[in-house]
Image: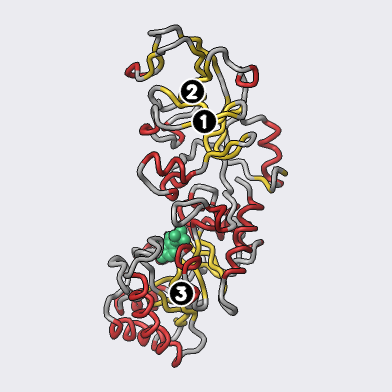
Amino acid sequence: MNLAAIERNCARLRAELRPGASLCAVVKADGYGHGAVQSARAAQAGGAIWLAVATAAEAAELRFAGIAGCLLVLGALTPGELDVALGADADVIAWSEEFVAAVADRAGEAGARVHVKLDTGMGRLGTRDPAEADRVAAAVLAAPRLELAGAMTHFATADELGDGFFPGQLERFRLWALALKAEHPGLALHAANSAALLRDEAAHFDLARAGVAIYGLDPFQRDAGERGLEPALELRSWVAALKHCEVGESAGYGRRFIAQRPTTLGVLPLGYGDGVRRALANNADVLVGGQRRALVGAVSMDNVTVDLGDPRPDNAGLGAEAVLVGAQGSERITVEELAKRLGTINYEITCGLSARVPRAHHRDGEPVADERARAAAGGRTGS
Ligand SMILES: *Cc1c(COP(=O)(O)O)cnc(C)c1O
Protein backbone atom coordinates (compact mmCIF):
# COMPACT_ATOMS: atom_id res chain seq x y z
CA MET A 1 0.00 0.00 0.00
CA ASN A 2 1.54 3.29 -1.07
CA LEU A 3 0.58 5.76 1.63
CA ALA A 4 2.11 8.59 -0.37
CA ALA A 5 -0.51 7.88 -3.06
CA ILE A 6 -3.33 8.21 -0.49
CA GLU A 7 -1.78 11.46 0.68
CA ARG A 8 -1.57 12.83 -2.87
CA ASN A 9 -5.10 11.64 -3.70
CA CYS A 10 -6.42 13.54 -0.68
CA ALA A 11 -4.55 16.66 -1.71
CA ARG A 12 -5.89 16.20 -5.25
CA LEU A 13 -9.48 15.84 -3.99
CA ARG A 14 -9.12 18.87 -1.74
CA ALA A 15 -8.01 20.92 -4.72
CA GLU A 16 -11.30 19.92 -6.38
CA LEU A 17 -13.41 21.18 -3.46
CA ARG A 18 -15.23 24.46 -3.54
CA PRO A 19 -13.50 27.12 -1.40
CA GLY A 20 -14.40 26.62 2.25
CA ALA A 21 -15.25 22.93 2.00
CA SER A 22 -13.18 20.32 3.86
CA LEU A 23 -12.34 16.72 3.11
CA CYS A 24 -13.59 13.86 5.25
CA ALA A 25 -11.62 10.68 4.51
CA VAL A 26 -13.72 7.53 4.86
CA VAL A 27 -11.61 4.71 6.29
CA LYS A 28 -14.34 2.19 7.16
CA ALA A 29 -13.87 -1.55 6.47
CA ASP A 30 -10.18 -1.32 7.39
CA GLY A 31 -9.67 1.54 4.98
CA TYR A 32 -11.39 -0.35 2.13
CA GLY A 33 -8.87 -3.13 2.77
CA HIS A 34 -5.85 -0.80 2.79
CA GLY A 35 -5.40 -0.63 6.58
CA ALA A 36 -7.54 1.86 8.52
CA VAL A 37 -4.92 3.34 10.80
CA GLN A 38 -2.25 3.85 8.15
CA SER A 39 -4.79 5.17 5.64
CA ALA A 40 -6.20 7.59 8.23
CA ARG A 41 -2.74 8.97 8.99
CA ALA A 42 -1.95 9.33 5.30
CA ALA A 43 -5.29 11.07 4.68
CA GLN A 44 -4.62 13.50 7.51
CA ALA A 45 -1.16 14.19 6.05
CA GLY A 46 -2.94 14.88 2.76
CA GLY A 47 -5.15 17.47 4.43
CA ALA A 48 -8.27 15.55 5.42
CA ILE A 49 -9.69 17.36 8.45
CA TRP A 50 -12.31 14.70 9.18
CA LEU A 51 -12.26 10.92 9.27
CA ALA A 52 -15.32 8.68 8.99
CA VAL A 53 -15.92 5.02 9.77
CA ALA A 54 -19.02 2.83 9.71
CA THR A 55 -18.93 1.25 13.17
CA ALA A 56 -18.10 2.16 16.74
CA ALA A 57 -15.37 -0.49 16.90
CA GLU A 58 -13.70 1.09 13.88
CA ALA A 59 -13.73 4.46 15.66
CA ALA A 60 -12.21 2.88 18.77
CA GLU A 61 -9.47 1.25 16.68
CA LEU A 62 -8.38 4.63 15.29
CA ARG A 63 -8.33 6.26 18.72
CA PHE A 64 -6.47 3.30 20.21
CA ALA A 65 -3.77 3.88 17.60
CA GLY A 66 -3.51 7.49 18.78
CA ILE A 67 -5.32 9.15 15.88
CA ALA A 68 -6.76 12.51 16.89
CA GLY A 69 -9.10 14.89 15.12
CA CYS A 70 -12.74 14.95 14.05
CA LEU A 71 -14.18 11.47 13.66
CA LEU A 72 -17.66 10.52 12.48
CA VAL A 73 -19.40 7.15 12.83
CA LEU A 74 -21.69 6.74 9.81
CA GLY A 75 -23.62 3.63 10.80
CA ALA A 76 -26.51 2.68 13.05
CA LEU A 77 -25.51 1.92 16.63
CA THR A 78 -26.87 -0.34 19.36
CA PRO A 79 -26.83 1.19 22.86
CA GLY A 80 -23.63 -0.71 23.62
CA GLU A 81 -22.01 0.50 20.41
CA LEU A 82 -23.13 4.03 21.18
CA ASP A 83 -21.12 3.87 24.40
CA VAL A 84 -18.07 2.72 22.43
CA ALA A 85 -18.50 5.49 19.84
CA LEU A 86 -18.93 8.19 22.50
CA GLY A 87 -16.01 6.70 24.44
CA ALA A 88 -13.94 7.18 21.28
CA ASP A 89 -15.01 10.85 21.19
CA ALA A 90 -16.64 10.28 17.80
CA ASP A 91 -19.56 12.23 16.37
CA VAL A 92 -22.69 10.15 15.80
CA ILE A 93 -25.63 10.35 13.40
CA ALA A 94 -29.28 10.55 14.45
CA TRP A 95 -32.57 10.39 12.55
CA SER A 96 -35.02 9.77 15.40
CA GLU A 97 -35.85 11.59 18.62
CA GLU A 98 -35.56 8.26 20.48
CA PHE A 99 -31.95 7.91 19.42
CA VAL A 100 -31.20 11.50 20.46
CA ALA A 101 -32.65 10.68 23.89
CA ALA A 102 -30.35 7.64 24.09
CA VAL A 103 -27.34 9.75 23.17
CA ALA A 104 -28.30 12.39 25.76
CA ASP A 105 -28.70 9.63 28.33
CA ARG A 106 -25.34 8.04 27.70
CA ALA A 107 -23.21 11.05 26.79
CA GLY A 108 -22.04 11.81 30.33
CA GLU A 109 -20.26 14.99 31.38
CA ALA A 110 -18.20 15.31 28.22
CA GLY A 111 -21.33 15.57 26.05
CA ALA A 112 -21.61 14.44 22.44
CA ARG A 113 -21.81 15.84 18.93
CA VAL A 114 -24.68 14.75 16.72
CA HIS A 115 -25.33 15.01 12.98
CA VAL A 116 -28.92 14.73 11.71
CA LYS A 117 -29.53 12.61 8.63
CA LEU A 118 -32.20 13.24 6.03
CA ASP A 119 -32.95 10.40 3.63
CA THR A 120 -33.32 12.22 0.32
CA GLY A 121 -33.56 9.04 -1.73
CA MET A 122 -31.02 6.45 -0.65
CA GLY A 123 -33.81 4.61 1.11
CA ARG A 124 -31.70 3.27 3.97
CA LEU A 125 -30.67 5.26 7.06
CA GLY A 126 -32.13 8.67 7.84
CA THR A 127 -35.65 10.03 7.97
CA ARG A 128 -37.46 10.80 4.72
CA ASP A 129 -39.47 13.54 6.42
CA PRO A 130 -37.74 16.95 6.61
CA ALA A 131 -40.13 17.94 9.43
CA GLU A 132 -39.01 14.92 11.45
CA ALA A 133 -35.38 15.78 10.70
CA ASP A 134 -36.07 19.25 12.09
CA ARG A 135 -37.61 17.73 15.23
CA VAL A 136 -34.53 15.54 15.66
CA ALA A 137 -32.33 18.64 15.31
CA ALA A 138 -34.49 20.46 17.87
CA ALA A 139 -34.17 17.54 20.27
CA VAL A 140 -30.38 17.72 19.97
CA LEU A 141 -30.44 21.47 20.62
CA ALA A 142 -32.71 21.01 23.63
CA ALA A 143 -30.46 18.44 25.29
CA PRO A 144 -28.05 20.23 27.62
CA ARG A 145 -24.88 18.30 26.80
CA LEU A 146 -25.48 17.63 23.11
CA GLU A 147 -24.16 19.70 20.26
CA LEU A 148 -25.82 19.86 16.86
CA ALA A 149 -22.70 19.43 14.74
CA GLY A 150 -23.96 18.57 11.28
CA ALA A 151 -26.74 17.85 8.81
CA MET A 152 -26.25 15.26 6.11
CA THR A 153 -27.59 12.98 3.42
CA HIS A 154 -26.17 10.27 1.14
CA PHE A 155 -26.56 9.85 -2.64
CA ALA A 156 -27.82 6.67 -4.29
CA THR A 157 -26.71 7.30 -7.88
CA ALA A 158 -23.84 9.78 -7.79
CA ASP A 159 -21.65 7.21 -9.58
CA GLU A 160 -24.06 6.95 -12.53
CA LEU A 161 -22.97 9.90 -14.60
CA GLY A 162 -25.82 11.71 -16.24
CA ASP A 163 -28.63 10.08 -14.24
CA GLY A 164 -31.61 12.20 -13.31
CA PHE A 165 -32.06 11.09 -9.70
CA PHE A 166 -28.95 12.72 -8.25
CA PRO A 167 -30.05 16.33 -8.91
CA GLY A 168 -33.37 15.70 -7.14
CA GLN A 169 -31.62 14.31 -4.06
CA LEU A 170 -29.29 17.27 -4.05
CA GLU A 171 -32.21 19.69 -4.27
CA ARG A 172 -34.17 18.00 -1.45
CA PHE A 173 -31.08 18.19 0.77
CA ARG A 174 -30.31 21.78 -0.16
CA LEU A 175 -33.80 23.00 0.71
CA TRP A 176 -33.79 21.38 4.15
CA ALA A 177 -30.14 21.82 5.08
CA LEU A 178 -29.71 25.46 4.06
CA ALA A 179 -32.79 26.47 6.07
CA LEU A 180 -31.41 24.64 9.11
CA LYS A 181 -28.02 26.22 8.63
CA ALA A 182 -29.55 29.68 8.36
CA GLU A 183 -30.73 29.20 11.95
CA HIS A 184 -27.55 27.45 13.13
CA PRO A 185 -24.59 28.79 11.17
CA GLY A 186 -22.10 26.55 12.96
CA LEU A 187 -23.55 23.40 11.36
CA ALA A 188 -21.41 21.36 8.97
CA LEU A 189 -23.52 20.33 5.97
CA HIS A 190 -22.34 17.24 4.12
CA ALA A 191 -23.69 15.08 1.34
CA ALA A 192 -21.02 14.10 -1.18
CA ASN A 193 -19.31 10.74 -1.53
CA SER A 194 -16.34 10.39 -3.90
CA ALA A 195 -18.50 10.31 -7.02
CA ALA A 196 -20.51 13.38 -6.01
CA LEU A 197 -17.32 15.23 -5.04
CA LEU A 198 -15.89 14.62 -8.52
CA ARG A 199 -19.18 15.18 -10.29
CA ASP A 200 -20.78 18.33 -8.93
CA GLU A 201 -19.39 21.20 -6.89
CA ALA A 202 -22.93 21.99 -5.73
CA ALA A 203 -22.78 18.82 -3.63
CA HIS A 204 -19.67 19.86 -1.69
CA PHE A 205 -21.31 22.04 1.01
CA ASP A 206 -18.99 22.20 4.07
CA LEU A 207 -17.58 18.70 3.94
CA ALA A 208 -17.22 15.93 1.35
CA ARG A 209 -17.00 12.33 2.55
CA ALA A 210 -14.64 10.60 0.13
CA GLY A 211 -13.79 6.95 0.50
CA VAL A 212 -12.97 5.02 -2.63
CA ALA A 213 -11.22 7.92 -4.39
CA ILE A 214 -8.69 8.52 -1.62
CA TYR A 215 -7.32 5.05 -2.34
CA GLY A 216 -6.93 5.94 -6.00
CA LEU A 217 -9.91 3.85 -7.08
CA ASP A 218 -12.40 5.23 -9.57
CA PRO A 219 -15.95 5.70 -8.25
CA PHE A 220 -17.20 5.49 -11.85
CA GLN A 221 -15.38 2.15 -12.44
CA ARG A 222 -13.27 3.64 -15.19
CA ASP A 223 -9.58 4.56 -15.05
CA ALA A 224 -8.82 6.54 -11.90
CA GLY A 225 -5.80 7.97 -13.70
CA GLU A 226 -8.16 10.02 -15.90
CA ARG A 227 -9.10 11.91 -12.75
CA GLY A 228 -5.56 12.34 -11.51
CA LEU A 229 -5.91 9.66 -8.85
CA GLU A 230 -3.23 7.04 -8.16
CA PRO A 231 -4.02 3.54 -6.94
CA ALA A 232 -2.41 2.92 -3.56
CA LEU A 233 -2.81 -0.84 -3.62
CA GLU A 234 -0.72 -3.50 -5.28
CA LEU A 235 -1.27 -7.21 -4.76
CA ARG A 236 1.90 -9.18 -5.32
CA SER A 237 2.87 -12.81 -4.98
CA TRP A 238 5.69 -14.94 -6.39
CA VAL A 239 6.33 -18.03 -8.45
CA ALA A 240 6.74 -20.68 -5.75
CA ALA A 241 6.86 -23.74 -8.01
CA LEU A 242 7.08 -24.58 -11.72
CA LYS A 243 5.20 -27.46 -13.28
CA HIS A 244 5.80 -28.56 -16.84
CA CYS A 245 2.69 -29.94 -18.55
CA GLU A 246 2.57 -32.12 -21.64
CA VAL A 247 -0.57 -32.16 -23.76
CA GLY A 248 -3.43 -33.63 -21.72
CA GLU A 249 -1.90 -33.06 -18.28
CA SER A 250 -4.02 -31.03 -15.92
CA ALA A 251 -3.66 -28.71 -12.94
CA GLY A 252 -5.82 -27.94 -9.93
CA TYR A 253 -9.20 -28.98 -8.55
CA GLY A 254 -11.66 -30.27 -11.09
CA ARG A 255 -8.91 -30.40 -13.76
CA ARG A 256 -10.20 -27.03 -14.93
CA PHE A 257 -6.93 -26.60 -16.85
CA ILE A 258 -5.86 -29.30 -19.28
CA ALA A 259 -2.80 -28.50 -21.42
CA GLN A 260 -3.65 -28.26 -25.13
CA ARG A 261 0.04 -27.75 -25.90
CA PRO A 262 3.20 -28.31 -23.87
CA THR A 263 3.64 -25.47 -21.38
CA THR A 264 5.00 -24.54 -17.98
CA LEU A 265 2.72 -23.44 -15.16
CA GLY A 266 3.81 -21.20 -12.32
CA VAL A 267 2.20 -21.85 -8.95
CA LEU A 268 1.53 -18.70 -6.88
CA PRO A 269 0.92 -19.24 -3.15
CA LEU A 270 -2.30 -17.27 -2.72
CA GLY A 271 -5.95 -18.00 -3.41
CA TYR A 272 -9.49 -17.31 -2.33
CA GLY A 273 -8.35 -17.55 1.29
CA ASP A 274 -6.56 -14.29 0.56
CA GLY A 275 -9.48 -12.76 -1.32
CA VAL A 276 -8.58 -13.81 -4.88
CA ARG A 277 -12.05 -14.72 -5.99
CA ARG A 278 -12.79 -18.19 -7.38
CA ALA A 279 -14.65 -16.71 -10.32
CA LEU A 280 -11.28 -15.51 -11.67
CA ALA A 281 -10.46 -19.10 -12.72
CA ASN A 282 -9.57 -18.99 -16.43
CA ASN A 283 -10.70 -15.34 -16.26
CA ALA A 284 -7.77 -13.14 -15.20
CA ASP A 285 -4.23 -12.16 -16.05
CA VAL A 286 -1.22 -11.98 -13.74
CA LEU A 287 1.97 -10.09 -14.55
CA VAL A 288 5.13 -12.23 -14.46
CA GLY A 289 8.37 -11.18 -16.13
CA GLY A 290 6.73 -7.97 -17.33
CA GLN A 291 4.04 -9.75 -19.35
CA ARG A 292 0.42 -10.72 -18.91
CA ARG A 293 0.03 -14.46 -18.19
CA ALA A 294 -3.33 -16.18 -18.06
CA LEU A 295 -4.55 -17.40 -14.69
CA VAL A 296 -5.51 -20.96 -15.62
CA GLY A 297 -7.37 -23.66 -13.76
CA ALA A 298 -9.23 -23.35 -10.49
CA VAL A 299 -8.50 -20.70 -7.88
CA SER A 300 -8.05 -22.75 -4.74
CA MET A 301 -7.85 -21.52 -1.16
CA ASP A 302 -4.09 -21.20 -1.04
CA ASN A 303 -2.79 -21.45 -4.63
CA VAL A 304 -3.41 -20.31 -8.17
CA THR A 305 -1.66 -21.35 -11.38
CA VAL A 306 -0.57 -19.17 -14.28
CA ASP A 307 0.46 -20.24 -17.78
CA LEU A 308 4.06 -19.14 -18.37
CA GLY A 309 4.28 -20.66 -21.86
CA ASP A 310 6.80 -22.89 -23.59
CA PRO A 311 9.63 -22.24 -23.67
CA ARG A 312 9.24 -20.45 -20.34
CA PRO A 313 11.01 -17.07 -20.47
CA ASP A 314 14.05 -16.81 -18.19
CA ASN A 315 12.54 -13.88 -16.30
CA ALA A 316 9.47 -15.95 -15.33
CA GLY A 317 11.30 -18.55 -13.27
CA LEU A 318 11.22 -19.77 -9.71
CA GLY A 319 10.99 -16.82 -7.32
CA ALA A 320 9.83 -14.35 -9.96
CA GLU A 321 7.48 -11.61 -8.82
CA ALA A 322 3.82 -12.08 -9.78
CA VAL A 323 1.54 -9.02 -9.80
CA LEU A 324 -2.21 -9.55 -9.50
CA VAL A 325 -2.93 -5.83 -9.06
CA GLY A 326 -0.44 -3.15 -9.99
CA ALA A 327 2.26 -2.47 -12.55
CA GLN A 328 5.19 -4.48 -13.79
CA GLY A 329 7.32 -3.26 -16.65
CA SER A 330 4.96 -1.43 -18.99
CA GLU A 331 1.94 -3.59 -18.09
CA ARG A 332 -0.65 -2.75 -15.45
CA ILE A 333 -3.63 -4.55 -13.92
CA THR A 334 -6.15 -2.37 -12.13
CA VAL A 335 -8.69 -3.26 -9.48
CA GLU A 336 -11.29 -1.96 -11.93
CA GLU A 337 -10.19 -4.60 -14.48
CA LEU A 338 -10.69 -7.38 -11.93
CA ALA A 339 -14.03 -5.91 -10.87
CA LYS A 340 -15.22 -5.89 -14.47
CA ARG A 341 -14.22 -9.52 -14.95
CA LEU A 342 -16.15 -10.44 -11.82
CA GLY A 343 -19.19 -8.30 -12.56
CA THR A 344 -18.67 -6.26 -9.41
CA ILE A 345 -17.19 -2.93 -8.31
CA ASN A 346 -13.67 -2.04 -7.21
CA TYR A 347 -14.91 -1.48 -3.63
CA GLU A 348 -15.76 -5.16 -3.23
CA ILE A 349 -12.37 -6.31 -4.50
CA THR A 350 -10.22 -4.35 -2.06
CA CYS A 351 -12.58 -4.90 0.89
CA GLY A 352 -12.45 -8.61 0.05
CA LEU A 353 -8.70 -8.98 0.59
CA SER A 354 -8.54 -11.15 3.67
CA ALA A 355 -6.66 -10.56 6.89
CA ARG A 356 -4.19 -13.23 5.76
CA VAL A 357 -2.65 -10.92 3.16
CA PRO A 358 0.23 -9.10 4.87
CA ARG A 359 -0.25 -5.38 4.33
CA ALA A 360 3.09 -3.77 3.54
CA HIS A 361 2.80 0.00 3.83
CA HIS A 362 5.34 2.23 2.15
CA ARG A 363 5.76 5.74 0.83
CA ASP A 364 6.72 5.63 -2.86
CA GLY A 365 8.75 2.49 -2.19
CA GLU A 366 10.31 3.57 1.13
CA PRO A 367 9.07 1.32 3.93
CA VAL A 368 7.30 3.35 6.61
CA ALA A 369 8.87 3.12 10.04
CA ASP A 370 6.92 0.26 11.61
CA GLU A 371 7.11 -1.77 8.38
CA ARG A 372 10.89 -1.92 8.16
CA ALA A 373 11.14 -4.92 10.46
CA ARG A 374 8.60 -6.91 8.47
CA ALA A 375 10.21 -6.04 5.14
CA ALA A 376 13.56 -7.20 6.54
CA ALA A 377 11.91 -10.48 7.59
CA GLY A 378 11.25 -11.11 3.92
CA GLY A 379 7.49 -11.44 3.38
CA ARG A 380 6.92 -12.22 -0.29
CA THR A 381 3.18 -11.93 -0.63
CA GLY A 382 1.82 -8.52 0.10
CA SER A 383 -0.01 -5.46 -1.00
C1 LIG B 1 -19.05 4.75 2.54
C2 LIG B 1 -19.70 6.06 2.63
C3 LIG B 1 -19.14 7.18 1.99
C4 LIG B 1 -17.95 7.09 1.07
O1 LIG B 1 -18.35 6.60 -0.19
P1 LIG B 1 -17.32 6.49 -1.43
O2 LIG B 1 -18.18 6.14 -2.56
O3 LIG B 1 -16.37 5.39 -1.07
O4 LIG B 1 -16.65 7.79 -1.56
C5 LIG B 1 -19.74 8.41 2.19
N1 LIG B 1 -20.84 8.53 2.97
C6 LIG B 1 -21.41 7.47 3.57
C7 LIG B 1 -22.62 7.68 4.40
C8 LIG B 1 -20.87 6.21 3.42
O5 LIG B 1 -21.46 5.17 4.01
* Residue identified by numbered label 3: 203
Quadrant where the N terminus is found in the figure: top right
- Asked whether the residues under the numbered discs 1 and 2 touch, taking CB atoms below 8 Å apart as contact, a structural biologist would say yes
Looking at the rendered structure, the secondary structure element under dot 1 is strand
Q: Nearer the viewer, residue 94 or 291?
A: 291
Q: Is residue 75 left or right of residue 264?
A: left
Nearest to N terminus: mark 3 or mark 2? 3
Q: Residues within 10 Å of mark 3 (few under 14, many from 20)?
A: many
Residue 154 location (% of width, % of height): 38, 69
The amino acid sitting under disc 1 is Val
Residue 118 location (% of width, % of height): 34, 76
* Residue identified by numbered label 1: 286
Q: Residues within 10 Å of mark 2 (few under 14, many from 20)?
A: many
* Residue identified by numbered label 2: 306
Indicate if the residue with disc 1 has its beta carbon within 8 Å of ligand 1: no
Q: From mark 3 to mark 2, how far is it between C-alphas? A: 45 Å
